[in-house]
Amino acid sequence: MRLLVLFLAVPIIEIALFIQVGGLIGLWPTLAIVILTAIAGTALMRSQGAHAWAEVQRSFSEMRDPTRPLAHGVMILVAGMLLLTPGFFTDSLGLLLLIPGVRDAVMRQVARHVTVTNVGAGASMRREAHRPPYADGVIDGEYIVTEEDRTARAPVDLPPELDDDTPRRPGRGSGWTRH
């Protein structure tokens, strides 16, 4: 229900603001302000987005909790979408979200309504833990050549280094590959 009210209220607010501002300063200055805020907001979003991405990478490399920089990055993206939407109300909200203190306040407000119930490692770590030993295409094994194998073997012209029947030691090659 709140989302429906939001979808109805935002366009009504924008239309009312366009009428008020356009009546005060005229059509062309009003359109110029909308275009300039979109351009300035896009530039601010790109610079702050790059800063937020660098902070996310730094938190991962330093093994710190990346929640704050990730939340800031998401809010910067939302700010960019708001700034690209024509209108004074959405531009105001977008510019507010580009202020780090405002993003921190929004994050604190949202954190009051969020409960963490489970924390776990990434899926790639689970796959690695349950990976079968042959998943990388290599199967280690040993073999013994019996007399039956020697007599049943079809005559094949093998190079001398592969034709001996001595068991292979690690590091000497398996006989299946050439070095």
Image (cartoon, rainbow, N blue to C red):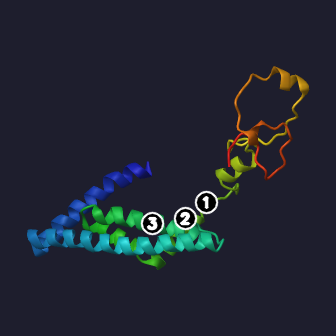
- Res. 175 visible in picture: no
Q: In this view, does 96 lie above or below 124?
A: below
- Position of residue 146 in the picture relative to residue 63 (left or right): right
Which image quarter: residue 90? bottom left
Q: Residue 57 carries which label?
A: none
- Position of residue 109 in the picture relative to residue 154 (left or right): left
Q: Name the residue under label 3.
A: 75
Quick one: which residue is furthest to the right in this view? 147
Which image quarter: residue 141? top right
Amino acid found under the numbered disc labelled 2: Val
Q: Name the residue under label 2.
A: 110
Mark nearer the viewer, 3 or 2: 3
Local crowd size for mark 2, using a 10 Å CA cut-off: few (<14), some (14–19), many (≥20): few
> Mark 1 to mark 3: distance in Å?
16 Å
Q: Judging from the image, what secondary structure is the residue with disc 1 in?
A: loop
- Position of residue 176 in the picture relative to residue 108 (left or right): right
